[in-house]
Image (cartoon, rainbow, N blue to C red):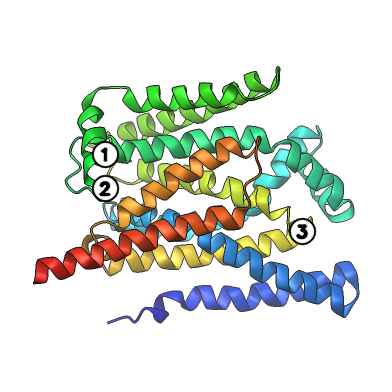
Amino acid sequence: MKTAASYFTWAFAVTALGLALSVWVGWSFTGTVEGTAGLFFISLVLAALEISLSFDNAIVNANVLKRMDPVWQRRFLTWGIVIAVFGMRIIFPLAIVAIAAQTGPISALVLAANDPGEYARIMDEAHPDIAAFGGTFLMMVALSFFLDPEKGSHWIAGPERWVARHGGTRGTDVAVTALVVLTVSQFFPDGADGRFVTMALWGLVTYLIVHVLGTALDKGGADKVAAQGGLGAFLYLEMLDASFSFDGVIGAFALTQNLFIIAIGLGIGAMYVRSMTIMLVEKGTLAAYAYLEHGAFYAIFLLAVIMFLQPLVHVPEVITGLIGVALIAASLWSSVRENRAAAA
């Protein structure tokens, strides 16, 4: 039987390789021991931040993966991690800068290497659009869980039962999300509110398209969190990972403007998320701890709210991560108490 540590073998290997690369990058950019040590430390901080922000991501991934075909499980855990590490942590920031600066991806890469300050400025300007898109997608993910009338267990029983009862009404999740978006947009200055609503609508449309494609691609799939087959669930998980990554990628620029250090630190964190996901699926942790999934979806809902508010009020990513960890820890403790009471 595999031990918990054995699930993290690849993560430990990537950590060693990534930290070695951070030393090389640090020396290449600074040429000093002090500068190299500083970038090495930032890599560690970014990895820890990504892990703390992604506990809930791993739990939701495991919830979908356990219903997927084994072939598609392996594909997500191999191809999916490549897309997560290279696509979201490297290509995504380059694509944003290339579009905003109306230049090519190679020019964006050169800009990141030669003028990281300008690169960070362009990324910061794109933050409100990214927050609106990602926040809307994540809010729909959370509401699809709480508005499920067939949800059998409830962590915070009274409110969750009331919300689930209203989940049978078609379009409730869309209506709630639209109402939140319109309310938040009222606090934006004239001109910026329209852009915020537009990007939020794109996030909503993307969520709905992913679900329509999932149902169409995975014949007989469920019209819930994701279709229970292969390609549709794969697409859903990739979009989910992207939404979780938005805030981490943008927030990383508060610690360093070096794209390569950001990619190394967040890439290390992504490998631990993959390892946690595999462990949760193979050990059946979600089934053993009834409220763990609830804690993850509460964390997702709050992350969506924070993403909506980020363009107006800066919330440090450390606070966001600690909130998620606290909710999951509380749900885990409630699950343990429930198991003890059942055993007694």
Q: Where, quadrant-wise, is the C terminus in this rendering?
A: bottom left
User: Which of the marked residues, 1 or 3, is nearer the chain's N terminus?
Assistant: 1
In the rendered image, is residue 58 in sight? no
User: Which of the marked residues, 3 or 2, is nearer the chain's N terminus?
Assistant: 2
Residue 156 numbered mark, or none? 2
The image shows a total of numbered marks equal to 3
Instruction: Please tell me which residue is depicted at 82% across the width and 51% down the height of the picture.
Output: 112
Instruction: Please tell me which residue is depicted at 35% across the width and 60% down the height of the picture.
Output: 330
The residue indicated by pointer 1 is 159
The residue indicated by pointer 3 is 256
Q: Position of residue 305 (x, y in %)?
A: 50, 38
Q: Secondary structure at mark 3?
A: loop
Q: Vertical placement of 13 versus 160: above or below?
A: below
Q: Vertical placement of 113 versus 102: above or below?
A: below
Q: What type is the residue that disc 2 sits on?
A: Ile
In the rendered structure, the answer to whether residue 29 lies left or right of residue 128 reads right
- Verify CB contact (< 8 Å) between mark 1 and mark 3: no
